[in-house]
Amino acid sequence: MSHVNEAVDCFKNGSACAQAILATYGPDLGLSRTEAMRLGAGFAAGMRMGETCGAVTGAVMVLGLRHTKGDCDKLGSRENVYKAVRQFTSKFREQHGSPLCKELLGVDISTHEGMESAIEKKLFREVCPNLVQSAAEILEEML
């Protein structure tokens, strides 16, 4: 199974969007699946505030694993990851118009009414798998 399909299946089987991306790509970069699931857990639905899409934040974490080394606390050592993050975000924005969950879903899930609307409209089941797929496809091009 391709990593793209694996990420989408992971999401459809109950993982959050960030978890699906990080748990799919993280193990190839030295992060265990369990650690990836734990680390990505809080990033779902733009950190539950409708901010940056969890599939995007999961991808950013993957890019951090791929483009940094143990000395990433040194000034200038993060330029490669910053470049990759800008490239990823630009491609995601080209495809979807925004990296923000509330803009991608068309509702503000940080509010009770917005979350109810997202659930009622089945946005997490109908929109989010496509966003996870898109994030994984962009990562496939970049890794």
Image (cartoon, helix red, strand yellow):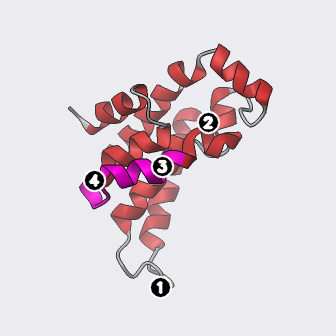
* Residue position marked by numbered label 4 in the rendering: 27
Specify the quadrant that holds the N terminus.
top left
Residue at 64%, 28% (x, y): give it: 105
Viewer-proximal residue among 31 and 55: 31
Mark 4 Cα within 10 Å, few/some/many (few <14, many 20+)? some
Q: Is residue 59 visible?
A: no
Q: Which residues are magenta?
A: 27-41
Q: CA distance from mark 1 to mark 2?
A: 34 Å
Residue at 63%, 32% (x, y): give it: 104
Residue at 44%, 29% (x, y): give it: 14
Question: What percent of the width, then of the height, locates residue 3?
Answer: 28, 39
For residue 36: magenta?
yes
Nearest to N terminus: mark 1 or mark 4: 4
Nearest to N terminus: mark 1 or mark 2: 1
Nearest to N terminus: mark 1 or mark 3: 3
Q: Which mark is residue 97?
A: 2
* Residue position marked by numbered label 1 in the rendering: 74
Q: CA distance from mark 1 to mark 3?
A: 25 Å
- Dot 3: element: helix
Residue 16 shown left or right of residue 111 in the figure = left
Question: What percent of the width, then of the height, locates residue 33?
Answer: 32, 49
Given the current orientation, which residue lies at the most extreme bottom position? 74
- Depth check, mark 1 against mark 2: the one in front is 1
Q: CA distance from mark 2 to mark 4?
A: 30 Å
- Dot 4: element: helix
Q: Amino acid at mark 4?
A: Pro
- Depth check, mark 1 against mark 4: the one in front is 4
Mark 2 Cα within 10 Å, few/some/many (few <14, many 20+)? few
The quarter holding residue 124 reads top right
* Residue position marked by numbered label 3 in the rendering: 40
Mark 1 Cα within 10 Å, few/some/many (few <14, many 20+)? few
